[in-house]
Image (cartoon, rainbow, N blue to C red):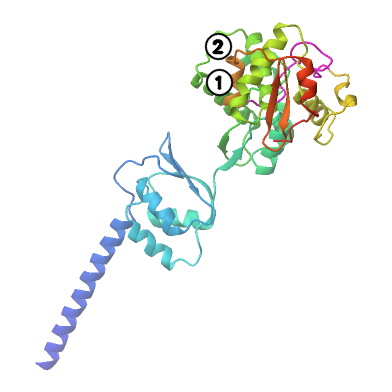
Amino acid sequence: MKKRNVFSAAFVVLSCFLLLAALALVLIVNANAAPSRAPVDTAGVRVENGGSVVIEIQDGESSRAAGRRLFEAGIIKSVLFWNIISQFEREYIKAGVYQIDLPVNQMALHRILQKGRQKLLRLTVPEGATLRKTAAILEDTGICTAASFLMAVEDRALLDEYRVPGETMEGYLYPDTYLFEANYPAELVVRKMADTFFSRLNELGIDAYSLEPGKLYEKVTLASIIEREYRVEEEAAVIAGVFKNRLENGMRLESCATVEYIITEIEGKPHPWRLYNRDIQIQNPYNTYIRSGLPPGPIAAPGAVALKAAFAPENNDFLFFRVADPESGRHYFSRNFDEHIAAGELFVKGNR
């Protein structure tokens, strides 16, 4: 009898254990499953077309902090379960940009972030960057080689497709932050940046395709010079007004930025911190100290501020400007040459 009671008690205990184990398994499976709600964009998470999301894990970000963001975005179902996984894993999640195909369960997602299996690389092209500088950034980032990029920006078929009358895409690749896969085709990089350029023009209210290619090229060229000349945003339109006045009066632009372009991009020399007479006498079509009108083409990638200024310059009567404060980059604007000479020494801004 006692033996039967022992077996009965053991059976009850085992049954309870199995029931609890089954319940725990159900809870784990349920918590681990992907959410039923659709994901949404949130801080560091962007929903892509085609059922995937781009997730950025910041340097030093904890697994718990990332879990909260992923829950808010609808990528994971339970913050508690995410934290439990993180507690038992030996490796931390790794910073980077990940493209994740949905749906994905929490354990699988945590392993991806833990192993650092990034699918996308972040490319940041600063305003005022030239094609050669952009090429170097691309190669350093591991997206494509500098040589393949520089070859792509000279592709005549691509230039004609985007109605660029120049010999390269200089000025038509928008300076921005992009996400690309490693070893991405250079042509597709160029297309993405060019498409973004025209998209940004549209956002500024500029219908690029209503302009003749040559007219747009002139505006982009002017914008690229403004980009390299201004540092204080509110001065961009003022500088554009100065250049507009000089062009209308048949005066040379005398832009330090064009001389700097010759020295650094064409001659391959270090960036000058000030210009001397020998510099402004360099015999080159891009030298606006000795050549009237605009240079043959853009000298850099203009951002939104410079583009807006080129298309909507301030109406003023200034004809000259020079750096008044090298540290802040503010300029002194003058209406005649005597005021200009009195303004002080000629500076050229540092490499931005």
Q: Secondary structure at mark 1?
A: helix
Query: Which residue is labeled 2 in the image?
Result: 209
Left or right: 116 as drawn, with respect to 252 = left
Percent coordinates x, y for residue 301 in the rendering: 66, 26
Which amino acid type corresponds to the residue marked 1 in the rendered image?
Answer: Phe
Q: Is residue 132 above or below residue 319?
A: below
Q: For this rendering, which residue is in front, 52 or 289?
A: 289
Percent coordinates x, y for residue 251 in the rendering: 77, 10
Q: Does the magenta run of residues contain 310? A: no
Q: For this rendering, which residue is in front, 323 or 267?
A: 323
Q: How many marks?
A: 2
Q: Which quadrant of the figure has residue 160?
A: top right
Quarter occupied by the N terminus: bottom left
Residue drawn at x 56%, y 36% is: 178
Looking at this rendering, what residue extends furthest in the right direction?
278
Quarter occupied by the C terminus: top right
Which amino acid type corresponds to the residue marked 2 in the rendered image?
Answer: Tyr
Query: Which residue is labeled 1 in the image?
Result: 198
Q: Does the magenta run of residues contain 290? A: yes
Percent coordinates x, y for residue 33 in the rendering: 32, 53
Q: Secondary structure at mark 2?
A: helix
Residue drawn at x 54%, y 45% is: 119
Q: Are marks 1 and 2 in contact (CB under 8 Å)?
A: yes
Q: Is residue 60 above or below residue 125?
A: below
Residue drawn at x 85%, y 22% is: 280
Question: Which span is picked out in magenta?
Answer: 285-302
C-alpha gap between disc 1 and disc 2: 9 Å
Q: Is residue 302 above or below residue 243?
A: below
Q: For this rendering, which residue is in front, 298 or 27?
A: 298
Q: Which mark is residue 56?
A: none
